[in-house]
Image (cartoon, helix red, strand yellow):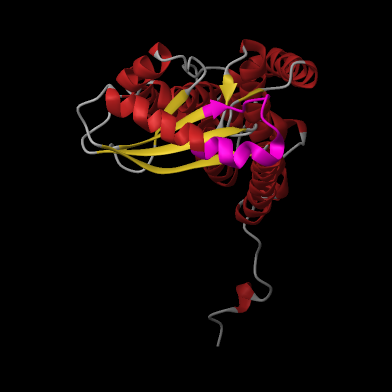
């Protein structure tokens, strides 16, 4: 070892890889068999948009709706703190061609129920029927967006660092997303647009952590003349450990605050990001770094290319 007090992260890289592989396989099996519990953002339903004359307390709105027979209603905030969206499951007894009319009627009823139980002035901004086809398109577009993001990231890191680093980064990101989705599938938690936004945020967070580690690995491979690839990766991980832990800890503080204070509207978003931050921190150490070791990264891979004729520069 290069340092006596360093944590030997790569000493347990094989058990870590086996644990990660098992978690990914379990997640994929769950996604294939149980799928995700899609929210009404991805399924058919009625969306009612309302404006209040004062700030809205979502728990009070939920209580009013449940007390009036709308137990399946989901209330979320959008725009300002005076605007809400009430999402209701589709009424299966109504023909598809009549769902738009039914949505308009439901919107008026919901607005009346809330107005009768509130001192605020409530305005109905709109009431729309969201078809299953629209929900399917949202899911497809979201999945395509994540794939495109992974592809662009792979190209960027290949240019910025080296191809082996780009493979490690993309494998780590795929690992984070699959396990996060697997947890949602296994637990039966609702997957909605907020959760999808969290998935994209996880890509950004995990990538940032991986790039910091990769940058230090590249620097040490160029600067340090002694030590094997495993030892140099260990040194790099130890040097970035404090930064990684502080960043993760402060991010988790904010996310837990959102989880406990933000209410139902942000619950799925916060849970997804908390899972993603924890797994992303782990993957930047044990997945991205592990992959580049398995791909036999060498000093020659990371040396700055010498410009042809550079040794003649400055000669008369």
Residue 230 in the image, given as x and y percentages of width and height: 65, 28
- Tell me: residue 52, above or below residue 271: below
Q: Residue at x 47, y 18 (%)?
A: 70
Residue 97 in the image, given as x and y percentages of width and height: 69, 41
Residue range (magenta): 88-104
- Tell me: residue 146, above or below residue 70: below
Q: Residue at x 30, y 19 (%)?
A: 60
Residue 139 in the image, given as x and y percentages of width and height: 67, 38
244 horizontally vs 29: left or right? left
178 horizontally vs 25: left or right? left
Q: Residue at x 76, y 36 (%)?
A: 296
- Tell me: residue 165, above or below residue 31: below
Q: Residue at x 62, y 58 (%)?
A: 304
Magenta-span inclusion, residue 311: no
Position of the N terminus by quadrant: top right
| Viewer-nearest residue: 268 or 100 | 100
Q: Quadrant of residue 243?
A: top left
| Viewer-nearest residue: 126 or 180 | 126
């Amino acid at each position: 070892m290069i340092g006596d007090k360093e944590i030997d992260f790569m000493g347990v890289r094989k058990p870590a890889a086996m644990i990660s592989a098992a978690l990914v396989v379990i997640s994929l099996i769950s996604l294939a068999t149980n799928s995700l519990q899609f929210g009404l953002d991805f399924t058919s339903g009625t969306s009612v948009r309302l404006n209040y004359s004062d700030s809205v307390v979502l728990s009070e709105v939920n209580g009013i709706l449940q007390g009036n027979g709308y137990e399946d209603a989901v209330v979320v905030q959008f725009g300002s703190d005076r605007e809400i969206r009430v999402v209701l499951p589709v009424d299966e007894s109504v023909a598809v061609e009549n769902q738009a009319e039914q949505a308009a009627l439901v919107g008026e009823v919901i607005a009346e129920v809330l107005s009768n139980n509130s001192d605020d002035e409530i305005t109905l901004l709109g009431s729309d029927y969201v078809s299953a086809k629209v929900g399917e398109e949202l899911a497809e577009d979201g999945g395509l967006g994540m794939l495109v993001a992974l592809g662009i990231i792979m190209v960027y890191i290949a240019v910025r660092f080296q191809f082996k680093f780009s493979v490690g980064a993309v494998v780590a990101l795929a690992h984070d997303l699959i396990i996060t989705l697997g947890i949602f599938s296994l637990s039966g938690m609702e997957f909605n647009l907020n959760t999808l936004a969290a998935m994209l945020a996880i890509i950004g967070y995990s990538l940032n952590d991986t790039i910091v580690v990769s940058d230090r690995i590249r620097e040490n491979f160029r600067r340090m003349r002694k030590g094997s690839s495993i030892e140099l990766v260990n040194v790099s991980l130890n040097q970035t450990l404090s930064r990684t832990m502080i960043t993760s800890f402060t991010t988790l503080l904010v996310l837990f605050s959102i989880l406990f204070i933000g209410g139902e509207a942000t619950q799925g978003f916060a849970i997804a990001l908390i899972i993603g931050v924890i797994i992303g921190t782990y993957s930047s150490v044990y997945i991205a770094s592990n992959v580049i070791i398995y791909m036999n990264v060498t000093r020659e891979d990371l040396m700055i290319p010498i410009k042809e004729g550079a040794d003649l520069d400055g000669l008369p």
